[in-house]
Amino acid sequence: MNRTHNNGELRLTDLNQEVELKGWVQKTRNLGGLVFVDLRDRFGITQIVVNPDNINYQIATELKNEYVIYVKGTVVERSSKNKNIPTGEVEIVAADLKIINEAKQPPIIVADETDALEDTRLKYRYLDLRRPVMKNFLITRHLAMRATRNYLDENLFVELETPILTKSTPEGARDYLVPSRVNKGQFYALPQSPQIFKQLFMVAGFEKYYQIAKCFRDEDLRADRQPEFTQIDIETSFLNQDEILTLTEEMLKKIFKETINYEIKIPFERLTYQTAVNTYGSDKPDRRFGLLLNDVSYIFTNSEFAVFKDTVTKGKVVKAIVVKNAADKFSRKQIDKLQEVVKLYKAKGLAWLKYEKEFSGPIAKFLSVEEKVALVNTLNVEDNDLLLFVADDLAIANIALGKLRLAIADKLALIADSNYDFCWVVDWPVYEYDSEENKYQALHHPFTMPKKEDLNLLYTNPKECLADAYDVVCNGYELGGGSLRIHDQKIQNRMFEVLGFTKEEADEQFGFLLEALKYGTPPHGGIALGLDRLVMLLTKTANIRDVIAFPKTTTAQCPMTNAPSLVSAEQLAELNLKTK
């Protein structure tokens, strides 16, 4: 039972050939005695026809969806052609038909359109992956990985592996811990990223490393996040920031071209971190639409509207976005719902105005003529515009209005879904200050190199210190991030001091890296791109689970295998563990 062709291959040029096919029954139709079978495999569908006088007719009438079958027959031209599939001009007249394996009635519809709930799809993932749309997601993933490897190989990178069982280090997210049976009471951690190991490859002199690496973080999940994920991990020696950014742009250009035949324009525009958060309310800005954030604090320095005036007097800000030609699209009730959006992000409220030759709305009566004129001129206000204001701390105003602009863009369908908008966000602060913990935290990670001109700020004013760090952003997703790394032990020690590590704590957590820095470490830097998010963008799905073969739910569970699960008391005893 050999297979001469796949089920997406045959055309009119193959007429009268005797062929042998295998695959799954997509569906059967019995039309006036003739039985038609759509035979599916990974490559497509071929129609099989069985006449009533055919010796295989009885078998054909017994076929059900998802049976695995073998067909031998002759290619003929279809009288009723199907222009929707590549093989739609031909069919196979069966001479031999065999059932290789039967199938129960599937609990989901095996087709692009299915009515199954996601939990059901994940429970029967092996059936879900038979759906052509899902199969294409994973094939696109394969093509993206192949293009990545080809590009990096061409540029003399070496693919190296790093440990999965490693040491727990404080890198931001919660570790997954693995108890050691041999070393009782001690634990490995699954890697959040290969960060330290890839730096050690640079110490070892490999100069150009990459890995398509599995990473693990025990954090709350959402549509674009999984507990285990894959990143394209890259590290280089002796390259500066511009060279790393160019390398990444060219790699992404190759990936998009070879997977979906889309031409990316390079180089990408570069935004500073401050520009991104102040203009878009996000360090991963979606720039496919307007609704930019505007600081209008200066207009209200001496305002009679106490809320705005008091905010400015306290050193806070009044920021606004203008929704063009949309005043008539939002009722008072709908604007109240927008209030709920900003309050989710700690803003105290949302003030608003509508403009139709003059301003109207709850705060209009409190504004002077001069303030109204200033708003029109500063924000380029036109008839039927809606103005939305948040008065608060700068960070709160930015994030609240940033989330609001996304909600409005979604409601008004402002986003051109066919576009890919790439940019770099550069010049990140080295630290962010956690007022609740009363300490500094690394905004990227504690191995990020401060800008050369800011090194003195590490000692005098760490909050103002900027880093040679960069994120690549596409359509509002952080696609990847990286930095130049610290290669000087003194700078690394100072970084740990600012983060609150004692010398003993730094040695306990990162002693092996600090020791390595003593042995002629080259200047180095790199980037890690999220493969799963990259494939989400390539396939235009909004759910990261669609592009991972066997993903977890938002509660970090696998309905198919029932992981995580309880283990026996004997296994726990071997590990010297007890559960409450």
Image (cartoon, rainbow, N blue to C red):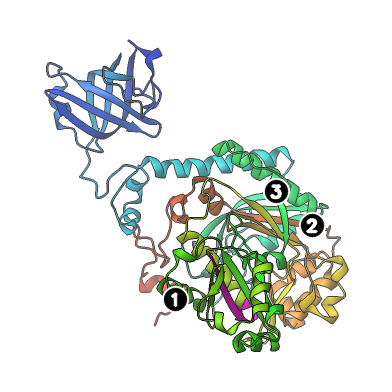
Quadrant where the image shows the N terminus: top left
Q: Amino acid at mark 2?
A: His
Q: How many neighbours does mark 3 have within 10 angstroms: few (below 14), some (14-19), or many (20 or more)?
A: many
Q: CA distance from mark 2 to mark 3?
A: 15 Å
Q: Which residue is mark 3?
A: 248
Separation of marks 3 and 1 at Cα, in angstroms: 43 Å
Across and down, in percent, residue 150 comes to 65, 38
Range of magenta residues: 385-396
Name the residue carrying label 2. 524
Give whichever of 272, 280 is nearer the camera.
Answer: 280
The image quarter containing residue 490 is: bottom right
User: Contact, CB < 8 Å: mark 2 with mark 3?
Assistant: no
Q: Is residue 200 left or right of residue 365?
A: right
| Mark 3 and mark 1 residues within 8 Å of each other at the beta carbon | no
Which residue is situated farthest in the top direction here?
16
Please name the amino acid that badge 3 sits on.
Thr
Closest to the observer, 446 or 387: 387
Which residue is depicted at the point 64% across and 39% down? 254
Mark closer to the observer (3, 1):
1
